[in-house]
Amino acid sequence: MIFPLTVPPFVTSVAVYCAAAGRLTSSAAKTTDRIGISSIPVRMDCSPPAAVPFLKKIARRGNAVERLSANRASTGYEICSRVRRMPQTFDFFYDLGSPYSYLASTQLAGIEQRTGANARLLPITLGGLRKATGHQVPPPQQLKYMSEDTARWAHQYGVPMQIPRAFPISTIQALRACIAADRRERGAEAMHALFGAYWADGEDISDGSVIERALARAGLDGKGLVAATHLQEIKDALRKNTDLALARGVFGVPTLFVGERSFWGNDRLHFAEAELRRQI
């Protein structure tokens, strides 16, 4: 039997199509397709072997499924399973001047490895959040507790940690450097390099020369990235990240979003991971 299908070019639609292809059988082999902007009218045999050429074409042309190894796929089931395993993402809002953001950042790789999800790194200015929300700088009593608490967490995670002599500081230029690095697909490396320079080594990352050296130690173009921090588009990007955080209800860092569920604080990472597992 021939089934006329209209398949929107989205991963979910392809997955639905694959599921249908796995259940239907036919002896017909005629296949015609036209790649359109909003739909892909198809008339084809819906058995898995006949579905392969069609799905391979989607894998080649559709941006959403570029990661599929279509040439290695042997059945419609295999391509379908690859589509379903497209990685989930979660948002990580952070400020380099936040000790709990640093601690949380050391755990991101583990979360990604265990869940198959990818972190979208979103540097923001905590000062901008506080100004917009009216949140005040923590009192001395809280800062004393924070010093003790972060030391406990660092020991728990097995990572170096110290409260820098220069604390608090302006992290705006360092955050811009992270955004510039992200545009070169090196955002994670820049973030970890600058977090480490500040919270592990106690360096003053409000200084452009310190930022440059820290990035260079990580194998990045420190000079070029520091120069990029003066570009208006990079400045605007940091402002937009902060505005996005405010629009989504962020009031402190680190804050993670899994879908539209938010998790504030280093001590909420296990809840965020559980939500990732639930959604995948």
Image: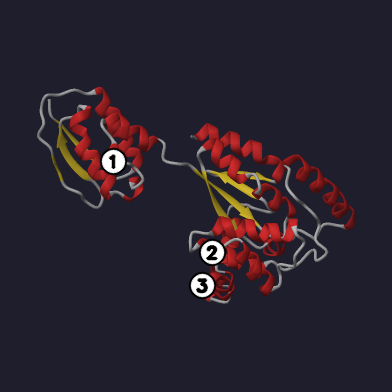
Q: Give residue 222's quadrant in the image.
A: bottom right
The disc label shown at residue 253, or none: none
Position of 90 with respect to 134 (left or right) is: left
Distance of mark 3 from mark 1, alpha carbons? 37 Å
Residue carrying label 3: 233
User: Where is residue 218 drawn, in percent x and y?
Assistant: 60, 61
Q: Give the mark nearer the N terminus: 3 vs 1.
A: 1
Residue carrying label 1: 70
Amino acid type at mark 2: Ala
Distance of mark 2 from mark 1, alpha carbons? 31 Å
Mark 2: few, some, or many residues within 10 Å (few <14, many ≥20)? many
Element class at badge 3: helix
The disc label shown at residue 181, or none: 2
Mark 3: few, some, or many residues within 10 Å (few <14, many ≥20)? few
Mark 1: few, some, or many residues within 10 Å (few <14, many ≥20)? many
Amino acid type at mark 3: Glu
Q: Are marks 3 and 2 in contact (CB under 8 Å)?
A: no
